[in-house]
Image (spheres, rainbow, N blue to C red):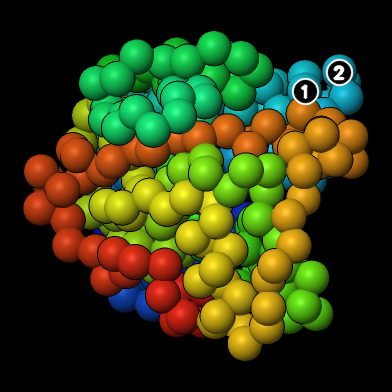
Amino acid sequence: MKVAITGSSGLIGTALRESYEGDGHTVVRLPRQVDRSQVDGVDVVVNLAGAGIGARRWTRSYRDVILRSRVDTTSSLVTAIGEARRPPKALLSASGVSYYGDRGDEVLTESSPGGMGFLPSVVRAWEAAAVAEIPVCHLRFGLVLSASGGVLGRMLPFFRAGLGARFGSGRQFWSWISLVDAVRAIRHLPGAQGPYNVTAPEPVRNSEFTRALALAVGRPAVLRVPAWSLRLALGGVAGDALESIRARPTRLIEAGFRFEHREVSRDVLTG
């Protein structure tokens, strides 16, 4: 099989590329501006491009970078697919559970309406750009957990130093998935259509996540970072950590996917 990937050097993209190549498949690493020759004859396209949500403070200019890096790349990709003589059979395009916005304890499935705010508006525009004449699957990722990067990679040094802390009240739900299961889910879904929550079956509260991570590294985590302090230090990025999104992977389970990691365990947090 021949697979083309945008964002192939990111956390998920690297792991996905290595997984496909390890099984003998051919992987084409796509740039952000794609032309039809690069997707012609490809079986599946996986679109993972986008500037990091937590990479910088959300200045007005960086908010535009977050939006444009997703929408422009996706639009370029869709145009290339439409112009290809032998178009791919399926497009899997990254999205996020941020679509739902801050919803407290409400259980959210793929049929739940979108929320309000900057990130929900970005996700709506992102998904709207991914409209093609082939099956399109919107991968609504939760927090993808890997000790080598992402939010967990940034938190681990603080917890290992005994500086772990819950964020705000700690009651907000975090929808998460291990990197291993994120890759397996992508490979499970070619040909699927519409939104899929790519999350573990049971979201956890931030306080539970903090406790599990402290236990995994054998260090205390009795501190609390007040919400106002996070907002002052991180700006808009803080909202992503303080908002509560209790997403369930209803459609992924219905598609027969079996999780390797259903709980926030030690091997997920430190492996």
In space, the residues marked 1 and 2 are separated at their CA atoms by 5 Å
Q: Residues within 10 Å of mark 2 (few under 14, many from 20)?
A: few
| Viewer-nearest residue: 92 or 28 | 92
Residue located 86% across and 18% down the image: 60
Residue located 62% across and 87% down the image: 218
| Viewer-nearest residue: 97 or 94 | 97
Relative image position of residue 94 (x, y in whole percent): 46, 37
Residue indicated by mark 1 = 63
Residue located 24% across and 64% down the image: 259
Image position of 261 (left or right of 238): left
Q: Residues within 10 Å of mark 1 (few under 14, many from 20)?
A: some
Residue indicated by mark 2 = 60
Which amino acid, mark 1?
A: Arg
Residue located 28% across and 41% down the image: 248
- When asked about the image quadrant of residue 105, the answer is top left
Relative image position of residue 155 (x, y in whole percent): 70, 64
| Image: 120 above or below 205 | above
Furthest residue in direction bottom, as rendered: 218
Do the residues under discs 1 and 2 have CB atoms within 8 angstroms? yes
Residue 55 visible from this viewpoint: yes
Which amino acid, mark 2?
A: Arg
